[in-house]
Image (spheres, rainbow, N blue to C red):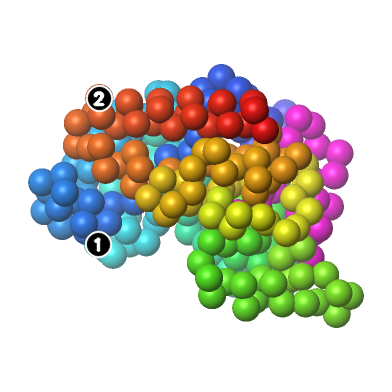
Amino acid sequence: MSPEPFGARLRRAMDTRGPLCVGIDPHSSLLTSWGLADDIVGLERFTRTVVEALADRVAVLKPQSAFFERFGSRGIAVLEKAVEEARAAGALVLMDAKRGDIGSTMGAYAATYLDPASPLFSDAVTVSPYLGFGSLRPALDAAAASGAGVFVLALTSNPEGAEVQRATAADGRSLAQLMLDHMAAENAGASPLGSVGAVVGATLGDAGADLAINGPLLAPGIGAQGATPADLPGVFGDAVGNVVPSVSRGVLSRGPDAAGLRAAAERFADEIRAAVSDG
């Protein structure tokens, strides 16, 4: 039997656990604020605390791979364990790796994150399409085969992103819209939700693009970056019901107390539900 598609699993997780993604971003400053050393012991303690506090209640956990990679093989070992334990507790794991390459190299990235035999196999991974959407084909095919998902960078919240994403393609569309249209084509006919998502910053104010891709819309920027749940309807319009708002420091800053992490996640989830319902 074919595995259940990621889009269906994500829709169910958001409906039952609430539409919230919490990032696992072990910044040096966060480790320090938790009273931990910026070393492998601190990394392991931080990560284990977040997973134990939240993996049984939030829809998605999103580890940022770079903050683990900086510790070398020992950091990757911590990441592997976090992925395994988070998925075992019922959270979907979105690996925030933003990989982008061509040919066999993209295929190797796909095997790393989207092959069930890999120790880093995740429910979804973030990728960059700006070597051409077709360069993502190995990841798209691997995800479809394993029931995983792919979140494609479209409209990011960093100001310098606009010089690429808002540039105009030969047919007059922005490059971001061109990528979104590719995603919509990948998701055509999927129900209840496609498995190819877009990354669209919650801080944009107005996305200025057609976000009806029949797939999830990962919305980083809630909390410390300045966006609030109330901003979501204005950015995402009619597609707001498919938004997966992502919060990192807004939750993580409430650690190391597990109860504080849970309370912050619950508060954001409640505010997001209310904003999406009102929108």
Whether residue 254 can be seen here: yes
Reply yes or no: does residue 190 show up in magenta: yes
Residue in the foreground of this view, choosing between 35 and 48: 35
Residue 46 locus on image (x, y percent):
22, 43
Q: Can residue 92 be seen in this view?
A: no
| Residue depicted at x 72% and y 28% | 1
Residue 105 appears in which quarter of the rendering?
bottom right
Mark number, residue 259: 2
Spatial distance from mark 1 to mark 2, Cα to Cα?
Answer: 28 Å
Dot 1 falls on a residue whose secondary structure is loop
The crowd level at tag 1 (other Cα within 10 Å; few <14, some 14-19, many 20+) is some
As drawn, is 33 to the left or to the right of 161?
left
Q: In the depicted view, which residue is nearer to us: 176 or 152?
A: 176
Hey, what amino acid is under mark 1?
A: Phe
Magenta span covers which residues? 178-200
Residue 65 position in % (x across, y down): 39, 56
Q: In this view, does 242 lie above or below 106?
A: above
Judge left or right: residue 78 versus residue 128.
Answer: left
Residue at left offset 48%, top offset 59%: 97
Q: Are marks 1 and 2 in contact (CB under 8 Å)?
A: no
Q: Where residue 71 is drawn, which disc sits there? A: 1
**Residue at position x 21%, y 57% in the image:** 29
| Residue ranking furthest to the top | 16
Quarter of the picture containing the C terminus is top right
